[in-house]
């Protein structure tokens, strides 16, 4: 080894390693791509699985809890997993424009990937109910934004009809390629743990993601990569819980705007995932969501968006039911930076303002 090599080795100065190629490249043989598929990627996937002691401490009994921090994807949410697939396939089919309805994250992701693939991106959003960060992304990524006076469910009805009538590709989770891409997160979890977890806790809105995880866990199980299948534990916000109420919620309401959905398109598939996995669904209140959101932030240094915290809130709510020594994974679907308004209104931080700009005042305020 030359001296330079020795120094590089000692101080780990090699280029970023291992080189993550993006999820399509990494899980190619599990995905419907071929040699002609132009892969539109921002190197999504490969997100960390992080152990969270602060949650374990609240549960006890030797139970291990991890979070799958999918808010670290290129546009800050799990949607990138599905979008790399949906947009690559749209490109392969010669499509020039895509459309989606969105509570924010899908629109950000669709815009980024579509533009990267040289396509137009139209996004329909419920006016006034999309977090600032997500709206900012759609605009910067060059989407054509259509804000409607109606909720997500209405927006989805409209885009489904538009995609039927006009030459434009729908990239909501009714697009099967979205689910294909998103299932890779289940693969990553099993690859990281060497086994499937006992429970997977996940927030549900349109219920595409729970469908995708269940598909991924089943495929890996059938191929012998895991010896167990997780129970799928889905959570919705109380004011927006059609899958728990088993009904359509006409006017969904929750602080977690990402999952403010009253009529999930993947309802049947989510129910199958629940039944086949012997899992269970439960509603959590906005207060419980914010409690989990704060714990993750201030005790773990993990900033997720409110919808994502529903998975941890749900786990804490079900803590009596967890078998001893279980391994649990909670999916953190989106990054906290997406919703700065929620963060600024919901924290326990000490914030001293209007201070005179001198050392004495600052030191005194600090308690010296
Ligand atoms: N978490 C976040 C951060 C989301 O943005 C969404 C959905 C979900 C969870 C629920 O996932 O719909 O697959 O059950 N957001 C969609 C959107 C609806 O438009 O961005 P799901």
Image: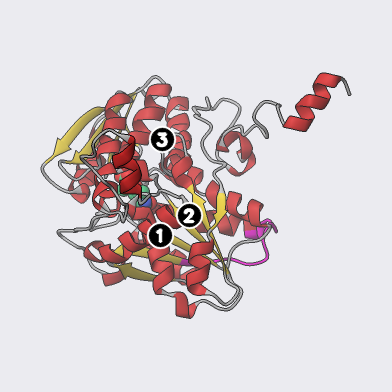
Quickly name the residue at label 2: 300
- The colour scheme of the drawn protein is secondary structure
Circle on res. 42: none
Mark 2 Cβ and ligand 1 under 8 Å apart: no
- Looking at the picture, how far across and down is residue 41, in whole percent? 50, 29
Magenta region, residue range? 221-232
Q: Which residue of the protein is positioned furthest toward the left in this rendering?
A: 149
Quickly name the residue at label 1: 295
- Relative vertical location of residue 248 with respect to residue 14 in this rendering, above or below: below
Is label 1 in contact with label 2 (beta carbons under 8 Å)? yes
Q: CA distance from mark 1 to mark 2?
A: 7 Å
The residue depicted at 31 percent of the width and 67 percent of the height is 284
The residue depicted at 47 percent of the width and 79 percent of the height is 321
Question: Secondary structure beneath disc 2?
Answer: helix
Question: Secondary structure beneath disc 3?
Answer: loop
Q: Which residue of the protein is positioned furthest toward the right in this rendering?
A: 1
Question: Along the horizontal axis of the image, is 355 left or right of 304?
Answer: left
Mark 3: few, some, or many residues within 10 Å (few <14, many ≥20)? many
- Relative vertical location of residue 84 with respect to residue 272 in this rendering, above or below: above
Mark 2: few, some, or many residues within 10 Å (few <14, many ≥20)? some
Quickly name the residue at label 3: 75
Q: Which is more N-terminal, label 2 or label 1? A: 1
- Looking at the picture, how far across and down is residue 203, in whole percent? 38, 58
Q: Quadrant of the N terminus?
A: top right
- Looking at the picture, how far across and down is residue 268, in whole percent? 36, 62
- Which of pointers 3 and 2 indicates the residue nearer the eye? 2
């Amino acid at each position: 080894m030359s001296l330079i090599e020795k120094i590089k080795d000692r101080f780990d100065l090699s280029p970023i390693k291992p080189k993550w190629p993006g999820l399509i490249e990494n899980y190619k043989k599990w995905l419907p791509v071929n040699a002609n598929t132009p892969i539109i990627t921002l190197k999504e996937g490969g997100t960390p699985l992080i152990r969270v002691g602060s949650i374990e401490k609240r549960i006890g009994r030797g139970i291990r809890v991890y979070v799958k921090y999918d808010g670290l994807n290129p546009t800050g949410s799990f949607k990138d997993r599905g979008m790399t697939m949906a947009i690559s396939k749209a490109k392969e089919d010669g499509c020039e424009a895509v459309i989606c309805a969105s509570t924010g994250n899908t629109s950000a992701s669709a815009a980024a990937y579509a533009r990267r693939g040289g396509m137009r991106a139209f996004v329909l959003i419920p006016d006034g109910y999309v977090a600032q960060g997500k709206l900012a992304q759609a605009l910067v990524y060059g989407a054509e934004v259509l804000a409607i006076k109606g909720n997500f469910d209405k927006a989805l009805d409209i885009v489904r009809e538009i995609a039927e009538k006009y030459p434009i590709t729908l990239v909501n989770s009714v697009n099967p390629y979205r689910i294909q891409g998103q299932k890779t997160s289940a693969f990553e979890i099993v690859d990281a743990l060497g086994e499937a977890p006992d429970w997977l806790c996940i927030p549900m809105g349109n219920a595409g993601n729970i469908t995708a995880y269940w598909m991924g866990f089943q495929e890996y199980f059938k191929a012998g990569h895991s010896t167990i299948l997780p129970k799928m534990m889905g959570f919705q916000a109380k004011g927006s819980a059609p899958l728990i109420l088993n009904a359509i919620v006409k006017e969904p309401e929750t602080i977690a705007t990402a999952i403010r959905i009253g009529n999930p398109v993947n309802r049947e598939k989510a129910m199958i995932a629940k039944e086949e996995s012997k899992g269970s669904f439960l509603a959590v209140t906005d207060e419980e969501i914010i409690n989990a959101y704060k714990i993750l932030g201030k005790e773990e240094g993990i900033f997720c968006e409110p919808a994502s915290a529903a998975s941890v809130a749900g786990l804490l709510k079900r803590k009596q039911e967890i078998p001893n020594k279980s391994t649990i994974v909670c999916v953190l679907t989106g990054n906290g930076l997406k919703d700065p308004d929620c963060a600024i209104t919901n924290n326990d931080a000490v914030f001293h303002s209007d201070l005179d700009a001198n050392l004495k005042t600052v030191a005194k305020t600090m308690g010296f």
